[in-house]
Image (cartoon, rainbow, N blue to C red):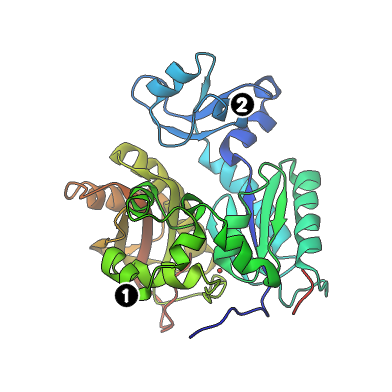
């Protein structure tokens, strides 16, 4: 049986209400007010909500109509992805001052492996505090962080003291932390899976840990093995930094499952921009666009199209992505979207997916 790897120090940094916070920072009139970034109250969908709006039940993925109903004073702001990417680049520049092992998940969050770091600081907790202070001082926004021995626990921990806080789960406290954790707080357990677990009498990590591997695989398929391991603190996935590859991609797992293709296109625009940035960074282009869709039941579908010429431009990638998205009807709600570009104009043969006792 695998054991907890206690020799790693992983930080998950998550910007607080990122899109909405950028809008409030750039427009002082919006500060302290309920703000929704998205398409408006008629047919739009909320992409992000300020903490003032969240008090009224406004969150990402709900309709603008429902947001207005829940919070009559809501202020809708159109998204400005170029601005969000600009701010994200500033934040990531700070990350790289501490380690080259940075794995961006989206514009507003990333994993950092600081087991060995450029500052020679043995405390991941102090590094996280310093990074968050620098983001506030140099960028003007707040961030939260989770610190632990692997990506899974760090990701879960980063939600505990939001906004503008952090939580460290030391190696000796991992099992205790996971046992009392509500199952809905487990990263990778969405609403549908949560309801199924409730039906099976699984409400906490302790309940999950009492189930056998056979039981979990029988009821949750391949994901059962994942649940069996993570509740025991076992998740050895490395922090993967960006590198030139045979295929270059970007993907994002959503906090709330998506049911609207319109909202999916909004997210794909951001993912395509990230992909374009990676391609241009390495001065490469490709011909084959692949859309990855992971549904709420964890089944994965890919759709691809090969162009007669090399592309690297966001708008061209997005055009193909749109065609692939609407190729057929969604089978279920969607928890992850990804875009990758293959058939590159490079001879590099590596393949990479870009997407987690020490003093803590």
Judge left or right: residue 302 versus residue 86. left
Q: Position of residue 45 (x, y in %)?
A: 39, 31
Mark 2–mark 1 distance (CA, rounded to whole Å): 45 Å
**Where 260 falls versus 123 (above or below)?**
above
Q: Position of residue 240 (x, y in %)?
A: 54, 72
The image quadrant that residue 353 belongs to is bottom left
Between residues 172 and 360, which one lies in front from this camera angle? 172
Q: Position of residue 311 (x, y in %)?
A: 36, 61
Q: Residues within 10 Å of mark 2 (few under 14, many from 20)?
A: some
Quarter the C terminus occupies:
bottom right
Judge left or right: residue 90 versus residue 260. right
Give the residue number, with chain letter if any, for mark 2. 52
Label 2 close to label 1 by CB (< 8 Å):
no
**Where 88 falls versus 244 (above or below)?**
above
Q: Position of residue 54 (x, y in %)?
A: 55, 30
Q: Residues within 10 Å of mark 1 (few under 14, many from 20)?
A: few
Judge left or right: residue 171 versus residue 301. right
**Where 128 falls versus 4 (above or below)?**
above
Give me the disc on residue 214. Answer: 1
Q: Residue at x 56, y 62 (%)?
A: 179
């Amino acid at each position: 049986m695998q054991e907890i790897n206690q020799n790693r120090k992983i930080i998950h940094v998550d910007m607080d209400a990122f899109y909405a916070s950028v809008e409030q920072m750039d427009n002082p009139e919006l500060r302290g007010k309920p703000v929704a970034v998205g398409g408006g109250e008629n047919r739009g969908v909320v992409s992000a909500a300020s903490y003032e709006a969240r008090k009224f039940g406004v969150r990402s993925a709900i309709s603008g109509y429902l947001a207005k109903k829940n919070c009559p004073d809501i202020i809708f702001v159109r998204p400005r992805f170029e601005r969000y990417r600009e701010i994200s680049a500033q934040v990531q520049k700070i990350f790289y001052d501490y380690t080259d092992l940075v794995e961006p998940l989206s514009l507003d969050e990333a994993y950092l492996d600081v087991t060995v770091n450029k500052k020679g600081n043995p405390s991941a907790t102090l590094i996280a505090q310093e990074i968050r202070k620098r983001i506030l001082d140099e960028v003007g926004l707040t961030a939260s962080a989770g610190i632990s021995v692997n990506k899974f626990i760090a990701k879960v921990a980063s939600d505990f003291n939001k906004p503008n806080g952090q939580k460290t789960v030391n190696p000796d406290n991992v099992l205790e932390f996971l046992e009392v954790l509500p199952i809905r707080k487990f990263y990778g357990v969405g609403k549908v899976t949560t309801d199924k677990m409730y039906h099976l009498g699984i409400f906490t990590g302790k309940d999950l840990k009492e189930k056998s591997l056979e039981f979990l695989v029988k009821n949750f398929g391949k994901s059962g093995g994942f649940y069996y391991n993570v509740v025991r603190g076992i998740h050895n996935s490395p922090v993967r930094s960006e590198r030139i590859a045979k295929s270059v991609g970007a993907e994002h797992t959503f906090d709330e499952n998506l049911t609207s293709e319109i909202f999916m296109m909004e997210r794909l625009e951001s993912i395509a921009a990230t992909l374009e940035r990676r391609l241009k960074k390495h001065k490469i282009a490709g011909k084959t666009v692949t859309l990855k869709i992971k549904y709420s039941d964890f089944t994965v579908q890919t759709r691809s199209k090969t162009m007669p010429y090399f592309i690297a431009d966001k708008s061209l990638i997005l055009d193909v992505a749109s065609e692939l998205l609407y190729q057929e009807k969604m089978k279920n709600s969607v928890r992850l979207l990804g875009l990758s570009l293959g058939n590159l104009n490079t001879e590099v043969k590596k393949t990479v997916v870009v997407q987690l006792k020490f003093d803590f």
